[in-house]
Image: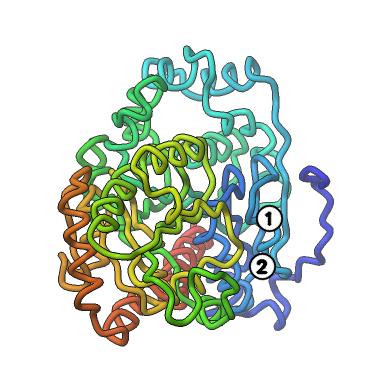
Amino acid sequence: MKPYSSENDDGIEDPASPQSRIGRGSAAAVAKRIAILLPSLEGGGAERSMLNLANAFTARGRKVDLVLCRVKGAYLEHIPPAVQLKALNPTGNFIARLVVIMLNLHRFMAVLRPVVLPSKTAPEIQYVISLRRYLRDRQPDAVLSALTYANLTALWARRMSGAPVPIVVSERISLSQHCFSASNRRKWRWRFLPPLVGKSYPEAEAVVAVSNHVADDLAAVTGFQRDSVRTIYNPVVDDKLYEQADAPLEHPWFAPGSVPVILGVGRLTDQKDFPTLLRAFARVRARRKVRLVILGEGKLHSALEDMAGELGVQADVQLAGFVQNPFNYMANAAVLGLSSLYEGLPGVLIQALACGCPVVSTDCPGGSAEILDDGKIGPLVTPGDDAAFAAALESVLDDPPDKDRLRERAQLFSTDRAAEQYLGLLDDLTASKSKR
């Protein structure tokens, strides 16, 4: 994969040409080229959502650059054909820190502990210089970035480049929980991140949160003005999801007439709290025939396998790893369980609803309650309470909800809906820039 080059290799149209008039108004009033910035494409909800947006943007006639700090991850092969991949080049850690200091002399104490002092800082900052060059040479009409350190990097690179490119930063998760959670306790730089976010995000032309809870939390933990944060739900549901949900599933546990399967989906990390799901499953398994399949990869794989053995349920538990198509699993599962300690807007809940799969979720900080209409669409239980989780799973197994009602709820989170909201925002910012 070649790193970003300043060479104009895509035949950008003359803004005055009739062919370049796309979208809602004149060529000068819309974002013809949109850059989407991500740290990488390692499998996660943010990465999948941004690829869905990129695909929707190109389908509406926009040009999209997918700008990656690190060209790696399970979703690399899912980049839409019309999207151009732009790989950034890293600098050394020392140079990167020095650049960040020079860009933030007016807020030196804010960058000191989350960026300068840690022995291992966020890798995204090593791409500030390369991103500056991309913005200066490529001059996209707007940048949409996702994930906190990538957002900061975008703002710093834009200031360094002097390019008049509107930046929209997207916050994907409950920042207070992420920065102060037990799993990040040893990453002490995260504890000092909120003040830097609060001082930096006002430089963005727009700040978007993926749920109202994430927006509320962002304002509370950083001091950022709540009315300056716009909520746009993630682009999750589209025709491709339905096509994949209808695909045959070659798995003996899902054959017609088989024992009901409880499904878990997500990275095997502390945040997802799969131990609670395992303990809840063991309680259910003690009373009825049922199986558990968990899709996803992560550092806790071996620990979860050991735990299943200790609980005596290993014969009915499968850790299947990352799968390219989780949706036909959802379409055939009896219920999906989300046991997370915190979230942003958990896409797996939305995907399961779209597939007609009943769900049980923890009422964790994040968007679970918003998705499930405060428990009207699926049970919500206290995080970490495996007894309550088991009871909720059994209630759904005994009395499954109407599948059409689940699918109808999922339409609130369609890709078309999100794409139109984002394009409306990006076009407004582009039009405002053209008037200056």
Tell me which corner region of the image, top left, top right, bottom left or bottom right, holds residue 178. top left
The answer to whether 422 is drawn above or below residue 246 in the figure is above
Residues 363 and 386: in front is 386
Tell me residue 403's x, y (percent): 31, 84
What amino acid is found at the position of numbered circle 1 in the picture?
Answer: Leu
Residue 384 lies, in percent from the top left, at 22, 43
Query: Is there a contact, CB below 8 Å, between mark 2 and mark 1?
Result: no
- 26 to 288, vertically: above or below: below
Q: Does label 2 or label 1 sit earlier along the sequence?
A: 2
Is any atom of residue 420 visible in this view?
A: no
Name which residue type carries label 2: Lys
Q: Position of residue 408 (x, y in %)?
A: 31, 83
Write down the quadrant of residue 349 in the picture: bottom left
Front residue of this view, candidates 286 and 229: 286
Q: Is residue 19 left or right of residue 260?
A: right
Residue located 69% across and 70% down the image: 15
Assess disc 1: are there few (<14), some (14-19) or many (≥20) residues with their C-alpha within 10 Å of its C-alpha.
Answer: some
329 to the left or right of 262:
right
Residue at point 31%, 48% (across, down) = 340
Between marks 2 and 1 in the image, the one whose residue lies nearer the viewer: 1
The residue indicated by pointer 2 is 63
Element type at marker 1? helix
CA gap between label 2 and label 1 equals 18 Å
**Crowding at label 2, few (<14), some or many (≥20) Cα neighbours within 10 Å?**
many
Question: In the image, which disc is placed on residue 76?
Answer: 1
Kindly state the secondary structure of the residue where label 2 is placed. Answer: strand
Query: In the orientation shown, which residue stands out farthest toward the bottom?
Result: 404
Say if 296 sits above or below 329 in the image.
above
| Residue depicted at 71% across the width and 51% down the height | 138
Q: How many marks?
A: 2
